[in-house]
Image: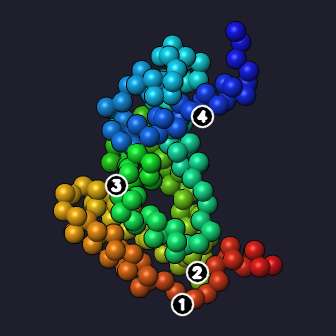
Amino acid sequence: MKVSQEQKAQNRSRILTEAGRLFREKGFDAVSVAEVMKAAGMTHGGFYGHFQSKDDLVAQTISHAVGSQSGIDDLGAWIDAYLSEPHREHPDLGCPMAALAGFMRQQAPEARASMAQVLAAQIATLTDVMPGEDSAKRRRAAIGSWSAMVGALILARSIDAPALSGELLSETRAWIDERKAPDQPTPAQKRRAA
């Protein structure tokens, strides 16, 4: 029985979603193609109808995982959710950057290129919602804030000390707030108002 293009696209999306969840939970090397396919409810044999190799799967999963996240409508609420205990406790469902960055150096060039594209897009998105008029300062604030947030989440997940772990998240949030410009509309807010 021939699978429709729509069903093939749904199957591929399901594979990428499950691969993203498993990679964030266990890392790239600890997850096999067979495990990904089983989690997606498919046989191992169907894998090569969607991907050329595991390296191809890794590269496409990175783009899919970040691309399936929603945009930033409210910067403060987004930062609060990112630096929250539920996000810390569920790396399998959370930010692929924080869960996968430490594994990227050993990955194939196409996976690292995919991560670089995703990172550049995330920085651009954050730059657009940062307050202030000066684009270079907004970009600096976006890079600094994003780096602090990802780093805080990685560190908070790495220890079995709930009080310190929570403090890493809350103090990073406070540090970001201290660096924000006075309440000025962001470029995105200005476009919506126009």
Left or right of residue 178: residue 47: right
Q: Position of residue 59 (x, y in %)?
A: 50, 37
Where residue 13 is drawn, which disc sits there? Answer: 4
Q: Earlier in the sequence, mark 4 or mark 3?
A: 4
Q: Position of residue 25 (x, y in %)?
A: 36, 42
Q: Quadrant of residue 159?
A: bottom left
The image's colour scheme reads rainbow
176 to 121, vertically: above or below? below
SS under mark 3: helix
* Crowding near the residue tagged with mark 1, few <14, some 14–19, many ≥20 C-alpha atoms within 10 Å: few
Looking at the rendered image, the quarter that the C terminus falls into is bottom right
**Residue underneath mark 3:** 89
**Residue at (52%, 20%) from the top-left corner?**
42
Distance (Cα) linking label 4 and label 3: 25 Å
SS under mark 1: loop
Question: Which of the pair 123/189 is nearer the observer?
Answer: 189
Marks 4/3 in contact by CB < 8 Å: the verdict is no
Residue type highlighted by circle 2: Pro
**Residue underneath mark 1:** 182
Q: Earlier in the sequence, mark 3 or mark 1?
A: 3
Distance (Cα) linking label 4 and label 2: 35 Å
Q: Earlier in the sequence, mark 4 or mark 1?
A: 4
Q: Earlier in the sequence, mark 2 or mark 1?
A: 2
Where residue 135 is drawn, which disc sits there? Answer: none
